[in-house]
Image (tube, rainbow, N blue to C red):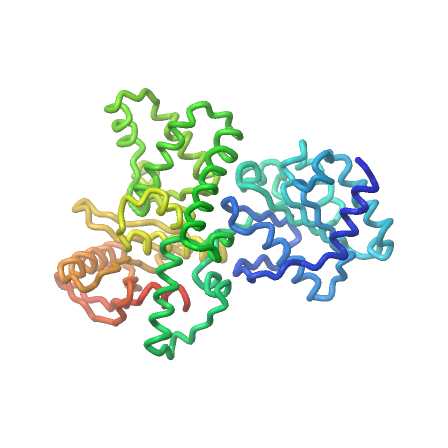
Amino acid sequence: MVKEEIKSYLINFQKNELPTLVERELKIGKIKKIKSIIGPRRAGKTFFMYQEIKRLIESGIKKENILYLNFEDPKLIEINFKEIEEIIKLHWQLYPASIKEKLHIFIDEPQNIKKWEIAMRALYDDGFNIYISGSSSKLLSKEIATSLRGRSISHILLPFSFREFLKMKETVFDIARLSSKEKANLLALFNEYLEYGGFPEVIPENKENKIKIIKEYLDLIVYKDIVERYKIKNVRLIRWLINSLIASFSKEFSVHKTYLTLKSRGLRVSKNTLYSYLSMLEDAMFVYSLPKFNYSIRKKEFSINKAYLCDTGFTRIIEISKNKGRKIENIVFLELVKQKNKNSLIDIFYWKNQQQEEVDFVVKQGTKLKQLIQVCSDFSNFETKKREIRALIKASRELKCKNLVVITEDYEKEEIVEWFGTKRKIKMIPIWKWLLK
């Protein structure tokens, strides 16, 4: 460890202004545990750390009582876990007044240090307030829970919500009083968000650069999160699986059917390998699997899950379908994940009966079913409307849940609907209004 370089790093942090930020909606609150921020690559985890630093400063904590260490910085890249304590001592030498106060330590990319978890445990046990954040390839909630033995609590940070997207665009709407021009502008912005997603670096770019950046992100996931981490040799299979998941977003994804497809093409691969690769992509938070609702735990475990992407921008890489409804459904799913992040009692499922009628989301809170949500972008087609509402009422009757919502592209109404003696009130709400409520 070169002490003069470390001192220079510490002084630079204290003197440099923090970047201008779009405030994220994720709220951590005051908890004594280690705060770990996990999420897909490039979702904005480092900037969220800066946001938390600003929050502490605004609450009256002096900046000299805050230590920020980014272990991808060249000055820190050779540090070992035993030297973190030495860095803290150097900070105290530079800022003696901070010895008497609680030190708030923010650590980016701790996984770059061997045995980093030992250092984190020691710092936590010494009473420091600790935040950690790193690439989803090595700093995952499961691994943190194991290595830090209950000392940490994880928070998921996804790409921007539509509300955050509008903040970055510096655009504000009063959705209760929209003029025709304002509504047209709002819908245009939503369509942009729908097509290119919410990665912070993607939003301000032109269309051509947006797609280039998204492709680079996908390469990072393939090579950093999967190939390098797990030492995978069959890169072609990983890419094929990713393409299949992108093609199947917002739909059921069967590993068995995928296995049969590969077999029919003469490609030898075991089901266990496919399940393993899918698990890797879930750990990297590239894709989410949504289980089918069933009161039987055993049946739930053996159901076919639906696949959702961490960001709809990835659909631009393989534009299999222009289906707007599937993209809206994916965005609804991500919004529900963010709600679950705020309330750990929430669980999300989909519902499907033997007649293959389906309701997109069953929202469960604790032991109670809170809401049934159907996504139907085109309500102008009578047959489509009838099919979607019929499934919703059947699910309502079977699951005994009366809070029914249909999320549409731009149709709003509240109706009393009756189907085979079952009468229900259904609220239909445009996606943009549901996201901004």
Of residues 122 and 82, the one drawn nearer to the viewer in this rendering: 82
Residue at left offset 24%, top offset 55%: 395
The C terminus is located in which quarter? bottom left
Where is 183 relative to 108, above or below?
below
**Residue 345, visible in the rendered structure:** no
Quadrant in which residue 74 is drawn:
top right
Of residues 353 and 92, the one drawn nearer to the viewer in this rendering: 92
Quadrant in which residue 421 is drawn:
bottom left
- Is 417 left or right of 360, judged from the image as shown? left
* x and y percentages locating residue 235 in the rendered image: 42, 27
The N terminus is located in which quarter? top right
**Residue 20, visible in the rendered structure:** yes
Q: How many marks?
A: 0
Where is 393 relative to 245, above or below?
below
- Is 191 left or right of 101, judged from the image as shown? left
Of residues 131 and 23, the one drawn nearer to the viewer in this rendering: 23
Quadrant in which residue 366 is drawn:
bottom left
Where is 174 relative to 289, above or below?
below
* x and y percentages locating residue 428 in the rendered image: 27, 67
Of residues 349 and 196, the one drawn nearer to the viewer in this rendering: 196
Residue at left offset 46%, top offset 37%: 219
* x and y percentages locating residue 95 in the rendered image: 84, 54
* x and y percentages locating residue 140 in the rendered image: 54, 40
Residue at left offset 39%, top offset 54%: 367
- Is 3 left or right of 429, judged from the image as shown? right
